Image: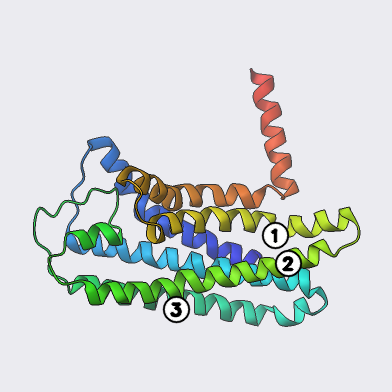
Amino acid sequence: MYLFLMQLSIADLLLTIDIVPILFHVLLHKVGVIAFPTCFVQFYIFACSECSECLLLTVMSYDRYLAICNPLSYTTIMNHSVCLKLITMNWLLSFLISMVELVSISTLEYCGAHTIDHFFCDLLPILELSCSDIRSFQVEIVLIAILVLIVPFTIVIMSYSWIICVILRIPSSTGRQKAFSTCSSHLIVVSIFYGTLFGVYVLKGQSLSISKLLSLMYTVGTPLMNPIIYSLRNTQILKAFGAFKSYVLQKI
């Protein structure tokens, strides 16, 4: 789990470095100018980190499934070699899928004001600038969404369905609480991440302001909250927070 958490942190760090500096510039100056090549690079890094996080959360849900539903075989199945292979496949798929999207949008023709009403170069705002026929590209995006979003989300749902069934069969309440606590942090992160992604890219009809707020949630809010959520069960972190709180109260 710590290997996967480290990769999740790397994906969050890439996303933050990619989005936040330009976001601060836009907030301070009320406007921002970005060249097309830079915009495409920003989109590529964004797509890589988002694809990686989708796949990592899926792998982590399978890891929790093995730990709770098949604990005796966990160390045999999810050994160090398998973890490294899953991590390598995760990044390779993320790079390749994002490259396919990048090549597709870079071959489109762009005309008009070249103004994006957003705080970063997201896919939908970029497509709105294109004067090319994007119907074939839209089919490609749907296929990628099924591969990166729908299939991983389905695997997560199936994993947690089995986990819940096993937890409910545990006779003691203490055992149920202990089993649920091992996957509660991951479940919270999955709910926030996939909830905002579905709100932006799957559910249509929301206003532009709501869409921007949801985008802000998964580009800035989720990377900010992930370390906090995963640290809530760490006793050393909790002790450090307690010591800091006591120090602040003494100063006050």
Counting residues from the start of the chain, the first of labels 1 and 3 encountered is: 3
Q: Which residue is mark 1?
A: 183
In front: 15, or 183?
A: 183
Residue at image point 69% right, 55% down: 184
In front: 132, or 31?
A: 132
Q: Nearer the viewer, mark 2 or mark 3?
A: 2
Residue 60 seen from this side: no
Amino acid type at image mark 2:
Ile
Helix, strand, or loop for circle 1? Answer: helix
Spot occupied by residue 235 in the image (x, y as percentages of width and height): 75, 47
Counting residues from the start of the chain, the first of labels 2 and 1 encountered is: 2
Residue at image point 27% right, 42% down: 25
Counting residues from the start of the chain, the first of labels 2 and 3 encountered is: 3
Q: Label 3 crowding class (10 Å Cα cut-off): few <14, some 14-19, many 20+?
A: some
Q: Which residue is mark 3?
A: 92
In the displayed structure, does residue 167 sit left or right of residue 99? right
Amino acid type at image mark 1:
Cys
Q: Residue 145 occupies which quadrant of the picture?
A: bottom left
In the displayed structure, does residue 250 sit left or right of residue 59? right
Mark pair 2, 1: CA separation: 9 Å
In the displayed structure, does residue 99 sit left or right of residue 145? left
Mark pair 1, 3: CA separation: 26 Å
Amino acid type at image mark 3:
Leu
Q: Are marks 2 and 3 in contact (CB under 8 Å)?
A: no
Q: Label 1 crowding class (10 Å Cα cut-off): few <14, some 14-19, many 20+?
A: some
Spot occupied by residue 223 in the image (x, y as percentages of width and height): 49, 52
Q: In the image, which disc is placed on residue 163?
A: 2
The colour scheme used to paint the residues is rainbow
Looking at the picture, does residue 54 appear above or below residue 176?
A: below
Q: Nearer the viewer, mark 2 or mark 1?
A: 2
Q: Label 2 crowding class (10 Å Cα cut-off): few <14, some 14-19, many 20+?
A: many
Q: Are marks 2 and 1 in contact (CB under 8 Å)?
A: yes
